[in-house]
Structures are given as C-alpha cells and as structure tokens.
Image: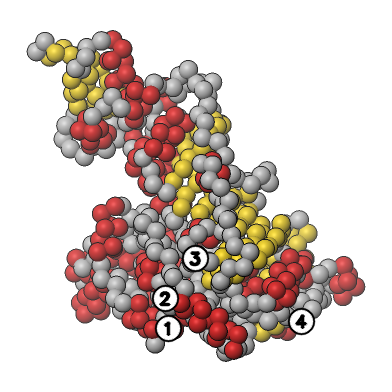
Amino acid sequence: MEAVEMKSVSLKRPYSEDDVANAEEIKRQKISPKPATGNDSGQSIETVAKQPDKSLLEDMKNEIIPNQINEDQEDEELEDNDEDGDPESFADMMKHGLTESDVGITKFVSSHKGFSGILKERYSDFVVHEIGKDGRVSHLDDFSVPVDDEDPSEETFTVLSEEDKQRLEELQLLKNKETSVAIEVIEDTKEKRTVIHQAVKSLFPGLETKTEDRDGKRYIIAYHAAGKKALANPRKHSWPKSRGSYCHFILYKENKDTMDAINVLSKFLRVKPNIFSYMGTKDKRAITVQEIAVLRITAQRLAHLNKCLMNFKLGNFSYKNHPLKLGELQGNHFTVVLRNITGSDEQIEQAMHSLREIGFINYYGMQRFGTTAVPTYQIGRAILQNNWNEVMDLILKPRPGAEKGYLVKCREEWAKTKDPAAALKKLPVKRCVEGQLLRGLLKYGMKNIISAFGIIPRNNRLMYIHSYQSYVWNNIVSKRIEEYGLRAVPGDLILKGATAVHVEEGDVSNYTIHDVVMPLPGFDVIYPKHKIGEAYKEMLAADSLDINNMRHKIRDYSLSGAYRKIIIRPQNVNWEVVAYDDPRIPLFITDLDKLEGKPLPVLPTDGKFRALKMEFSLPPSTYATMAIREVLKMDTSIKNQTQLNTTWLR
C-alpha cells in the first residue's frame, strides 16, 4: 500500500463540468433555517461551495470564543449580544486561522478520487452513541422510573411556589444574610406539612426544616443545618441504605456540549456540577447519547426535568454504588450524513471499502489546536520552554482573525497599558482563560507569571502542552508515512501489552501498519530506531527542547508521553446512498423519534440530491472528522470550510 499526499493546502479542488453543474443545483437549493436551540459550536464542515447558510456561519463564529470555562447564563447573553459582522467579513477574518497542513495533517492512505459533500448541514446529521466499557452501545429507550417506596410524591414538585423556590435557593446558596426561610402552611394538615418538608429537603439539599407556630399560623421553617459544607455534600442520612448512592442515566442531548448540559442540569436541580460524573465529553453540534451518573439525586427528580428542559431527555435510570470515570468507555458509535455528495457510486464504494479495510491516519483533529491566529500548541511550546513572558504574551496579545468584540478591546487595552485591572474592565466574561490569567496577574503581580497562570484550571493549562504533543505527533507521523509508506519496517514500535518494543528485522513479516504505534514525546517513552527517531529529536531541538529531558521544573508540566496507533480501522462500518429533495428533512430516525413513535422519513427514489449515510465505531481519543476527511479527501479546518461557505458571495 502506498500513502497518498494532499495535493494542495486548501483542497479547493478544480471542479469538473459535472461538479459545476451540481454546484449550480446546490446554489439554488433552499437552505434550512437555523434551529431555535441556541448557538452551535461543534465543527461544522462544509465541503461544497454552496450559497452560505447565514446561521451556519453564525455557528462557526460562535466557535471562535477561546477557552470558555463553564459560562453562566449572563455570560452567554453577553456573548449573544456581541457584534459579529457579516459572513463575508467573518470569512476574511478566518484567513488567519489554521489549515490542516499547519498542524501536520498532510497525508491520506487511500487511492480513490475525492468528492464533495456537506457535513453537519443540520446538527441532526451527526449522531454519537457512547460505547461503554462492557461494549454496549448507549441508547435512550426507556423513560420509566425505578419504583421506590422511599421516593417523595409527585406533589413534592408542585407544592412550593416559584417565590418560595427563589427564596429557598438564595438561602441554600448563602446568597443573602437570611438564616432561615418561613413558608406559611395554607391548608394546615399533617399530610400537607409532610409534603412541604419533603419538598424542601429533596429539592434543596443541605437545608433542614422544622414546624413553628407564629401568631396563630403554622409555618415550615427552612434553615442551614451544616453551613456551607452542606451544599457540597447532599444529605447522606436521607438516602436509603439499600439504594445505590449513584443514579445512572442516559442523557440524550441536541446541540449542547457535555459540560454545558451538566451545568444546566445542576442549575435546575440546585446542586453543584461536581456531583455528576461521565466517561467522556461529546460534540456540541450533534445529537449525542451517553451515560451520566449523579450522587444521591433520585431518578424521580431527574425524570421530572424531562417536562421542563429543551433539547435534553433523560432515561434508562438505575441505581449503582459507583460513579463513572473519564476514559472508561470503549469508544463511540457514529451515524453521519454527508449531504449533496458529488461522487459517483464507484467513488463512494472505493472510499468506504478503503475506510473499512485500511482505515485512516489517526491524526489529532483540528479541534485540538484552537481556532484563532494563536494556536494552542504555540502556548504549550512556550510552557515547555519555561518562557513565561511568551506564555502571557501569546494568551493576551492582540491577534488577527475572528474574536468576540469584548476580547478584542481587552487585548488592545493590555497591549497599550500592560495593566491587568484596566484590561479586566474591558472583559465582561471573566471566566475565560484570558480573564483567569488577568486576575492571576492582578493577584500575584507581573513578576510572578507562573503563579498567575496557575489560577487557570489545571485541565485548561494541560490542554496547551497536550496540544504541543499532538502537533509533534501529527507532523512526525506524516514524515513516517512519507518515508516508509503503509507497512511495518524494522525499527518501528509495536505494543506488547502496555510495553512498547522495537520491530526487529527477523520478525517484521509478523506485523502490519495496523500494529505500529508512534510516541507522543515524553520522559517515559522510547522512540523508533530508524530515521523517524532522529526526526523527533530534530523537531524538538528546533523548538529549543531536549527530547532526553522532558521533565519540567513544575511537575504538572512534565510530559511522561504515551503511544498512539498510526492507523485506525473503524469497526461496524456501514453505508448507504439515499436520494432526497428537501434539505430540512432528517434522513434517519433517532432514539427520541423511536420513543415518540415518529415514522421513518419517506424518501423519494429519484430525488434532486444524494446523501451518503455512514455508520462506524471508533475507540476513544480518535477523531471522526479525520475518518470523514479520508472519505472526502477534503480539508476539515474551519478556515477552509468558511472560505468554501462564502464562495458564492465573492
């Protein structure tokens, strides 16, 4: 097998007469309106030059907000009200973004001719089902609640007025100076008082209740039993010993990323987000189905949220004695629709057979590297170089390209004054990385950037150095495939259990390219014994880094390294080409559609447009966009796709 190199950076392939005719038809196509479900943020990949759907360009712009951390609703409103400009100016700004070749993504493994298609024209064209560690694919197929005599009555959820709930929430979160809240019992019966007691204790963990007589009237008094600790530790004594401490459930969500969903659930349940656990985060611009666990929240309370939440459904409830851990999953199963495909039946068959039999290069996708003119890997490189002034400058300096207006003003103020307080005043959204760093500089001073940077949450800080590792891996893997093609060679690395060993001359015939792994640089890995081992050293040396000394003086930033397979062969690959007329109709049925009894979409036998429906399963930490890239042979960067989106405006 021979590797195929990308022919150009932007992959705006010269169109044949057939392509032009097809594009003219696409140009006339009615574009579906944006769903009224909030802002989209998963990578929206347009791979044909069609008249742009303004809502899709809005989705891309909303993606450009760098490193937002659990924004609250007020922050989201600020973002929504910010001026973004028209689609053409946005495309012009995105000229400063990254393309695939900028991050080492330059090779293909298949020999078929690429073709055009549209990915995520609708977020419902991209569906992700989590695969648990037991190999079962997560599906939402049951709304029933486990029967439990300990559960409160349904009246618990309606007995308190909205005003009472507001006052109780403020008491629970210690938002005012009140030490208690009194709720008058209008219909004074023991049953009524019991329901109010249950409602307060179950809906507002951490609060205790008692009954008092005041001026001839009965009141339920709610108060804090254990101060601030009570909120973080839901009432242990109120949970039946026979019931598992964690309620596991399936979360079906549309057009929301996992952390946003957790924040919404915690807000409605009036608990902290850290009592939820999950095995992996899922795309925003998609329909995703995954397992979630929550500590000491009943299935009944969770099921009640189905009545009041948009774009979420919760089901398949069960009680267990353990939470979920990140990375415990086996992978994800993807169902993807590529609309308006231009490839012939033969091209499509070749592409899909290649995906099933050979696979795709296991590149880190564009999401790994950020979307602005300052890639995250550059910041990671500066951290590893111990160049903290450079880290500060890269995060805060003005940059060309697409950004929210308030960030532009903040950066300009910083460049002009180098005053953290003045720059912070320009930043209404404080919980972004820029805001965190500025607050750190305000607290620790300009001469202690390391401590100031440490205010940023650990996962966000590590994201930068992991991005640099990914950047090195992508570039070196492209060199490996260029040098040796798609076969195992002496000096390559393969895994025996969790241990990497070199392939020897005598046993090279025992291995294929699917066995070969490449290291992410670190102090606890070994490197290939051929030219590519030297390529690692040369690349890091060019960045003033010593491959033999990847320990950092700050332990968090010491890289141990890891091994990653060069080629991934998807499992359970299936595909079908269908015809359709209306781009607004769904082309397959979801879990929620099945539960609601919706029929399968009726499709014409000879429609105006063709779509490729494809399904495949991938292991964790692999990128579906890289599999789709191999099928289409198109650049998946936002920069390239935005330019394609605006072709018809130019």
Pick whichever, 551 or 567, lies toward us.
567
Determine the secondary structure under disc 4: loop
Determine the secondary structure under disc 1: helix
What residue is at 47 percent from the left and 49 percent from the top?
253
Q: Amino acid at mark 4?
A: Glu
What residue is at 88 percent from the left and 71 percent from the top?
509
Sooner in the amino-acid sequence: mark 2 or mark 1? 2
Q: Quickly name the residue at label 2.
A: 52
Do the CB atoms of the residues marked 2 and 1 lie less than 8 Å apart? yes
Between the C-alphas of marks 2 and 4, the distance is 37 Å
Q: Is residue 596 left or right of residue 58?
A: right
Do the CB atoms of the residues marked 2 and 4 lie less than 8 Å apart? no
Q: Amino acid at mark 3?
A: Pro
Report the mark closest to the observer, 4 or 1: 1
Report the mark closest to the observer, 3 or 1: 3
Any part of residue 83 in sight = yes
Compared with residue 592, is residue 442 higher up or lower down, i.e. above or below? below
Q: Amino acid at mark 1?
A: Trp
- Classed neighbour count for the residue bearing mark 2: other residues with Cα under 10 Å, few (<14), some (14–19), many (≥20): many
What residue is at 28 percent from the left and 62 percent from the top?
80
Between the C-alphas of marks 3 and 1, the distance is 19 Å
Which of the labelled discs sits on residue 583, or is there none?
3
Q: Quickly name the residue at label 1.
A: 648
- Classed neighbour count for the residue bearing mark 4: other residues with Cα under 10 Å, few (<14), some (14–19), many (≥20): some
Sooner in the amino-acid sequence: mark 2 or mark 4? 4
Sooner in the amino-acid sequence: mark 3 or mark 2? 2
Percent x, y of residue 76: 30, 57
**How many numbered marks have been drawn onto this rendered protein structure?**
4
Compared with residue 533, is residue 179 higher up or lower down, i.e. above or below? above
